[in-house]
Amino acid sequence: MTVLLAVSAWWARRSLRLRLTSAAALMISAALVGAACLLIVWLRMSLITDLDQTALQRAQVVAASADADNLAPVLPASGSGDTAVQVVDARRVVRSSSANLEGRPALFTFRPSLSGTAHTVHGLPLSEGGTWRAVALESGDDDPLTVYVAVSTAAVDHNLAQLTVGLAIAVPPAVALLTGACWLLTGRALRPVEALRAQTAELTACDLGHRLDPPPAEDALGRLARTLNDLLARLDVATRRQRQFVADAAHELRSPLSSLHTQLEVAVRHPGSADWAARGPALIEESERLSRLVDDLVRLARLDARPRLRMRPVDLDEIVFHEVRHARRHTCVVIDQHSVSAARVYGDGDALARVVRNLLDNAIRYAARRIEVSLGVRDRAAHLVVADDGPGIPVTDRRRVFDRFTRLDGARTRDTGGSGLGLSIVRDLVAAHHGHIGIEDNAPGARIVVRIPATDH
């Protein structure tokens, strides 16, 4: 078993061209050897059938002579000396025979049949024994006689032996020739694969915009090339998005870090004039802004890594009530939750709490006086709506606001304290729960609607 595993492992490390050619050589060898064997068997059966017919015809001629009482003690030869004839009566006395069996006792023991079935006989004292095909026919009514005719298979055996030797000599060169052709054809067929490999090897992280040259044939290699090009396109988009994300993150981190650094540097250089009581709230605000930004960046990084959410039945209405109570402690904006009703979904409680929290933070940031939160189940889906009375979101920007680090002009700027990541996190978390998020008009303001599949248990 260990040897077989070692051989299998060694064979798996061989080149694809060698393995394909070897498999083709084995199949070619098996096919040629099988065809040669079938040819020999078929030819032998055909020749033996001819011998049986010859013996039967000779027996019929002799039987006709016996019926006419025209049998001579020695029958004349019939074309070939490899034919033996004996006519035997019921007492096993030889009445007539061919010249090559003259004076011999009865040599055949099998019974005659009406169809003249042939039998294989060995050991006749003729032509150094050998193998014979013999038939027996019965003739006469009063004194029945049995006519035995045997035909030697020496010529057939000799011809088949010559054919076998010829095939044994011809098959190996044919296998070698066809194997060489398979080696050349396999190399030619794998040439596009090698071209694709060479082009792929030349690609680097900076060359993801390049594409492979697909072969002209619409076959598996063509589909492979198109699939690789699609993969390169997705990698290119993902790489560009990652680079843009890093650049935007660095840009966003620079502002609070620069502000903190400047204020601390002024305080260190002028310790006597530093009013920590006055600078403290500003420093705390900047540090909180930096902390929120870092937290959002970490969460986005985890979402990009496709974490496994802890999915279980969750009461979404309880999460909404809890987040509304928490949000009311940090704002003077009125938050109306009277339209929140029971809704149970299958999801991650922490992730869904983050969704509600980000939606409330976004609404609080831009609401003028009032926020309305509603929740209900319709069409087997939980509908969560957070509406504010702020400046609203133009229709042309309602898809763009879910992109990372996106801020709209006017009221939605960096000065409001947002990092441009809240709605992006909400979109990714909702998508992870097989849900959908959209933005509608609230006249005035914006209505953000989240739909997540509901569950009864």
Image (cartoon, rainbow, N blue to C red):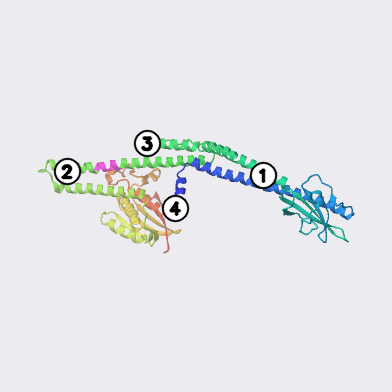
Kind of residue sitting beneath label 4? Thr
Q: Is residue 310 above or below residue 271?
A: below
Q: Point out residue 190 in the picture as x, y percentages from the top left corner.
A: 50, 38
In the rendered structure, find residue 206 and report the number of the disc placed on it.
3
Kind of residue sitting beneath label 2? Leu
Give the labeled residue for mark 4. 2
Using the numbered discs, state the Cα–Cα distance from disc 3 to disc 1 in whole angstroms: 70 Å
For the residues bearing labels 2 and 4, Cβ distance under 8 angstroms: no
Give the labeled residue for mark 2. 264
Give the labeled residue for mark 1. 161
Q: Is residue 365 shown left or right of residue 434?
A: left
Q: Is residue 364 above or below residue 267?
A: below
Q: Note whether residue 445 is visible.
A: no
Indicate whether residue 143 is drawn in magenta. Answer: no
Q: Earlier in the sequence, mark 4 or mark 3?
A: 4
For the residues bearing labels 2 and 1, Cβ distance under 8 angstroms: no
Which segment did they paint magenta? 249-255
* Between 364 and 275, the one nearer to me in the picture: 275
Identity of the residue drawn at 15% across and 47% down? 278
Identity of the residue drawn at 22% across and 46% down? 286
Q: Point out residue 355 in the picture as x, y percentages from the top left corner.
A: 34, 54
Q: Quadrant of the C terminus?
A: bottom left
